[in-house]
Amino acid sequence: MAEDLTDVATSATPDQELVYVNGLGLEPLYHMTSPDNTVLLHLKALAGIGYDSNVYATDTDVQGSLFYEGVAGFDLRWVPSQKDVMLLSADFDGMRYTAQPGRNLAGGKADFSYRHTAVDWDAGGEASFARTNDPYIVTGQEIKHDDGHAGIDGTSRWASQGSARLAATIDRTLYLEGAPGVFGKDDRNNTDFGGTARVADAFADQSEAYVQIGVDRRNYDESTFSQPIPIPGTDTLTTNGYNDSTGLLAVVGVRDKLGTRSGLIAEIGVISREYADTFAKDPAFNDKHVVKPALNLAYKWDWEPGSELGARAYSTVVDSVYSNAAWLYGVAVDARYRLSDEYKAALFGELGAYQLKSSGNPDTTIQPDDEVRTTGEISGGAEYVFHPGIGAQLKDVYDDSHSKYYNSFRRNVIEGELGFAF
């Protein structure tokens, strides 16, 4: 559902293209190009050291660990004509934990995209793969998993500044480990097939109103849990698996360039999911059909070159492990402040909060109500560019997550990084 603000609030970095490695943006030391300048290659690397205060996201027996991180990759752009652009980016990301070697990661990501732009139409496709240990939002636990994505889309434009867009996607999630006491390694592997249709009308420069409808089908590989899962408030173990589902999203939206350096996106609508059965085949959950408001509000203001302010609010539905679904809603504000005209130093930070509310519950003495998880996150840091192609950043992320019935935790992750771009 989310739209991008990139082209309605453009960052005014003066005539330079930044290369990003682990979120650190660097002006490259060299521009390696082909003789005809149609191919541009940048190499990048990063070394980091940090500390995770709560590796397993637990409220008792908390275990922290020092970790080391190394990133190596490249960005490649090929522009064979004025109408065609191909982009390829790949990063290897390795992490080693000194006190918790079971959390070591040999991962990374790769992204490919192609777009052809004509006078009254454009079309393209993208494919990506990522192996990460990003926290699972429903529980907060860091879980190693693979994410694959592929998609194609096409847009037709007509003289009245209107446009119509069709897109199709396929997403694959494969877990490399389970979440202790929550789900097994193979329980949540799934494939999602989706499609969207969007009709828009432009009412000003880089501003438009639109209607968008999306549908998707999510299928789990396994029809049963690989390990018995306790039903809260009872002595019963269930081996019923996660339910396949069909989702529908319908929104109306506005995408408006408010000024030279600011932009706004506002989408509102409804999102629903129809599941094959109630969670764990327990009729007490009463969550075979889930309907919630869909919301996406995003604002960005680049008040000067290298400094920006953003805010967003959102509402959507995600699959859960404690019921069929969870209603996810939250807000966040982020900012970046340039400390020098030469982009040598900057401060950045983000403040956000979100809540997940389960779509049902087993209606037992121990859990008579829906599970609710409330999480607040504060992050911030500083970066300094020593020389074109060489920079460093220090960043800190603090999470405070409270669950009504399950694992509550606090976690602080601080890391210092040295990055290179050539």
Image (cartoon, rainbow, N blue to C red):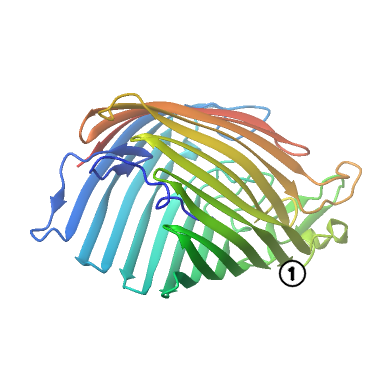
Task: In the displayed orientation, state which residue is furthest to the right.
Answer: 365
User: Which percent across, then down, holds residue 307?
Assistant: 39, 33
User: Which percent across, then down, holds residue 162?
Assistant: 47, 71
Q: Hey, what amino acid is under mark 1?
A: Ala
Q: Kindly identify which residue carries mark 1.
A: 276
Q: Quadrant of the C terminus?
A: top left
Left or right of 387? Residue 310 is right
Q: Is residue 5 visible?
A: yes
Left or right of 368? Residue 116 is left
Q: Nearer the viewer, residue 289 or 64?
A: 289
**Residue drawn at (61%, 34%), measured in percent from left and top?**
57
In the image, residue 328 above or below residue 198:
above
User: Which percent across, then down, holds residue 384?
Assistant: 31, 26
**Residue drawn at (18%, 59%), measured in percent from left and top?**
39
Is disc 1 placed on a helix, strand or loop? loop
**Residue drawn at (34%, 47%), measured in percent from left and top?**
92
Task: In the displayed orientation, state which residue is furthest to the left.
Answer: 35
